[in-house]
Amino acid sequence: MLPHFSGAARCILSASPVDPSDSRGIGKYTSLALLLPLSTLIGYAMGYGLDRLFHLTFLRWIFLGLGTISGFIELIRELDKDV
């Protein structure tokens, strides 16, 4: 039996992960693998568009950070669902 861990730590340490050869497992792991890069890219694209619209130079970096943070938050939420 595992010691008392919460959330993502329990998911990572669990003894019965989702079978990656199962179609549900493939879809889950693919979506988790794409979650962080896509949210970062979308945040940067939004910032770039707003920079072009308002003729600024710093919004792309702010939205890049926001996209990355939102990707990590959503990744942790998805990992907590398994527990």
Image (spheres, rainbow, N blue to C red):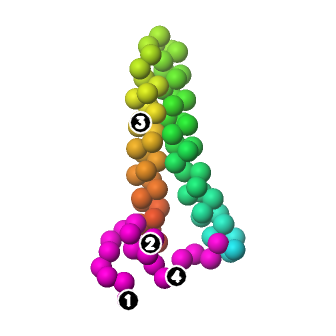
Task: State the residue at coordinates (44%, 31%).
Answer: 63
**Rendered image quadrant of residue 30:** bottom right
Which residue position is annotated with label 2?
11
Q: Earlier in the sequence, mark 2 or mark 4?
A: 2
- Secondary structure under badge 4? loop
- In magenta, the rendered stretch is 1-20
* Amino acid bearing label 4: Ser
Task: State the residue at coordinates (48%, 21%).
Answer: 50
Which residue position is annotated with label 4?
16
**Rendered image quadrant of residue 42:** top right
Residue 3 falls inside the magenta stretch: yes
- Could you say where residue 80 lies in the image, as x and y percent from the top left? 41, 66
Which residue position is annotated with label 3?
65
Quick one: which residue is furthest to the bottom in this view? 1
Q: How far apart are the alpha carbons under marks 2 and 3?
A: 26 Å
* Amino acid bearing label 2: Cys
Badge 3: residue crowd in 10 Å (few <14, some 14–19, many ≥20) = some
- Secondary structure under badge 1? loop
Q: Which mark is residue 19?
A: none
Q: Earlier in the sequence, mark 2 or mark 1?
A: 1
Which residue position is annotated with label 1?
1
